[in-house]
Image: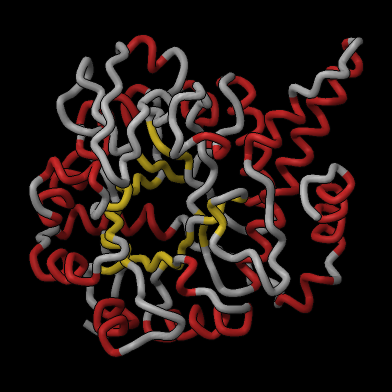
Amino acid sequence: MSKSTMKPGPITLDVVGLELNAEDRRRILHPLTGGVILFGRNFANRKQLTKLTAEIKKLRSDVLISIDHEGGRVQRCRTDGFIHLPAMRKLGELWGSKNKSTHAAESAAIAIAMAAATACGYVLAAELRACGVDFSFTPVLDLDFGRSGVIGDRAFSRDPQITFALAKSLNEGLRLAGMANCGKHFPGHGWAEADSHVAIPVDERSLKQILNDDAKPYEWLDLSLTAVMPAHVIYPKVDQNPAGFSKVWLHSILRQELGFEGVIFSDDLSMEGASVAGSVVKGANMALEAGCDAVLICNRPDLADQLLNGLKVSKAKQAESAVRLNRLMPTALAPTWEELQSEAQYQHAKGLLQQLKLIL
């Protein structure tokens, strides 16, 4: 199969360093690869990042280059001109700021918080796209119950209505800069106390409780949500499998009940929360059978090779997933970094965030 006729496969994997080595190239060229996810170790400066993304696109123009870039403590690029964006809780605090003695003051605080969220989304997407990154796994839609250390200030709010409104505003900023979005971690990682990177979290609440609270932002965002990442959390009152391996959560609830038509990404299959599958190939099979379109494997090149060598995907499944994945690819040409600095929208968004003291 020539590079020009390849379609994106279901595996999103990472690369080792600041430039591609021979093993990275081999993995990216594999027909099961559909995406490359970047981490802090892949960023030294803008020039290097832009060169790396161009190298990847030269190998496979159809591969989606993604990154975890939310703001706050989860932001991979934060030097050499990149604005260090606030944690999303800061936007929730703007919404709920105290000095609201009148209805007008309350309405103004809400409007300012929503404008700030749009500005964050625009800056985030515009800067990444200027360096050749297509997509970021953001926003976090988990509710802040004050229980989960791994979520914490990454969440907008405890209130699903505030979370929905600020996420929709942030998504609009992403869209204006030509980037899709990804709500995570469905149906909600805010209640479970364990960190799914190093443990297998369990949430004992009922389906009704979760649907009436945590899952509401997904329901309300509806067509404006382009991708979803399920949680490596087990909800035993609903299914014995973690949400990312569960047909109940992904097919029956997310696809059928909530009508979600976008891309479903598994969370990283090397995380402890995915270990219930027994092996990375079994985990990927479970995720794809449950309804995922793409599976992530990060920080373990050996496991990436196991997946590339051992995963069997039907042509029909790969074709269906490829159609969805292609919708996440930016369609408009992004400005260069230099062009971005003089762009009116970018300067406006940056100025608003500075005025609100959300950035330095």
Asked whether, in this view, residue 133 is left or right of residue 348, the answer is left
Please determine whether, in this image, residue 41 is positioned above or below residue 140: below
The colouring scheme, among rainbow, by chain, secondary structure or one colour, is secondary structure
Q: Residue at x 53, y 26 (%)?
A: 144
Q: Residue at x 27, y 69 (%)?
A: 33
Q: Residue at x 17, y 31 (%)?
A: 241
How far from the left and from the top, in percent, is residue 343?
A: 83, 67
How far from the left and from the top, in percent, is residue 199?
A: 26, 39
Looking at this view, is 34 or 242 the one in front? 242
Please determine whether, in this image, residue 161 is positioned above or below residue 234: above
Q: Residue at x 12, y 44 (%)?
A: 277
Asked whether, in this view, residue 169 is left or right of residue 213, the answer is right
Q: Within the image, what quadrant is residue 205 found in? A: top left
Q: Count numbered badges in the picture.
A: 0
How far from the left and from the top, in percent, is residue 67?
A: 48, 61
Please determine whether, in this image, residue 348 is positioned above or below residue 38: above
Q: Quadrant of the N terminus?
A: bottom left
Asked whether, in this view, residue 356 is left or right of residue 8, the answer is right
Find the residue positioned furthest to the bottom.
Answer: 22
Please determine whether, in this image, residue 327 is positioned above or below residue 246: below
How far from the left and from the top, in percent, is residue 158?
A: 56, 21
Q: Within the image, what quadrant is residue 166 found in? A: top right
Q: Within the image, what quadrant is residue 313 found in? A: bottom left
